Structure formats: structure tokens, C-alpha cells
Amino acid sequence: MAENESLDLGGAYAKRWDVPFDSVRKGESCRDVARKVESAMYSGLRKSLKQLQEYGVTLADLLAQRNSRQALRQLIRKTQGHHYVELFDAAVASSGTSEGECLRGWVDAIFDKVSDQICHRVAGKENWPTFYDVHSFMHDVQQTLEPAVERLVTNFEKDPEWKPKRAASKEQSTADPTAELLGLSLLGGSHQ
């Protein structure tokens, strides 16, 4: 079996998080970073849920065992210490007991794990003079992601077997592709 999906930036199995990390490092807008984080989060969850099934564990199993620390520990062992299961366990310990609270805590824990690493890696660099600057920015990213997080939680509550897939953005669906190309030169640059 391949290595588990990871949330450790810089690792071989967390490459999907390189895109939002680079976006923050370059000083891109909150909205752009949030879009990239959302994409990485959805694809990471989809891949992780698939991996959990290979171990014989589902999100429904995790939710069913949320009130038993011992049972959750057994599921962590069964999944060979999968990061997403460990974060579920940690989220259960700090969130409420309802399914929605557990799911919300889990998704927030995933974001927090990645966000903390981004903050530590880019603080003091060219676009982020202090840790507090980048931390404040990542808080804004989290606020921007709120509708996507709510969608995840709601869909998982309705169907724990649901596989996350990003909703098409309104911008993408209403944009005219021809109009977008009008500003581009054939040499690859934009012209005014």
C-alpha cells in the first residue's frame, strides 16, 4: 500500500499543499489563496477517505466511534497512524459530541495543521515580515473558506460516504472564455 496522505508540508506525500503554500509565500490575495487551499483540502480529503477504505475504515466508522477514545485509538492503529484519523481523534477530544461538531472540528483541525506550518515557513520572509502578519492573513483565508467548510460538514453529515468535490465557482461558470483571451497577446503577455 502506498504511503498515507500527509499534511506535513515539504513531505513527499503532501505535494498538493505546495500550491497554496507557494501562493502565500508569493503574497497572493486572500481570495486566491483560499481557492487553492479549498482545492487542496477537497482533494486531500477525497484521497484520504479512499485510503481509509483500503484499511477497512470509513468516515461513518469514525463518527460511530467518536464517543470512545479507545475505539478511535484502535482505528488509528488499523490505519497505521493516518494523519487524517489522528486529527479526527484530536478534534473529537476538543469539539462537541454531535456529528456536526466533530466534523467541523475535524475540518478545522486539517486547516489549522497546514496553516500553522505555512505560518512558520513564510514568517520573516520577503512578503511576511512577522509571524503575526502571516497568521492574521491565514485567519482571513479561513474566514473566506467558511462556505466551503460548511458545505463539507453538511455533505458529510448527510452522507459519510460522500466524496468531496469542489463546487464550480460562480466566476468560472459566468466568465466568457473569449473575453478572457482578448487581453492576451500571442506572445504570452497581456496588453493594455
Image (tube, helix red, strand yellow):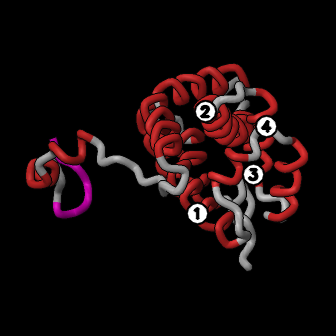
**Local SS, label 2:** helix
Residue 58 placement: quadrant: bottom right
Whether 191 is among the magenta residues is yes
Instruction: Identify the residue position indicated by label 4 in the image.
Output: 67
User: In this rendering, does residue 127 appear at all?
Assistant: no
C-alpha distance separating marks 3 and 2: 14 Å
Residue 165, position in %: x, y? 42, 54
Dominant SS in magenta: loop
- Span shown in magenta: 186-192
In primary-sequence order, the first of circles 2 and 1 is 1
Query: Which disc number belongs to residue 104?
Result: 2
Question: Which residue appears at 73% of the width and 25% of the height?
Answer: 131
C-alpha distance separating marks 3 and 4: 14 Å
| Image position of 183 (left or right of 42) | left
- Labelled pair 3, 2 in contact (Cβ < 8 Å): no
- Labelled pair 1, 4 in contact (Cβ < 8 Å): no
Q: Residues within 10 Å of mark 1 (few under 14, many from 20)?
A: some
- Labelled pair 3, 4 in contact (Cβ < 8 Å): no
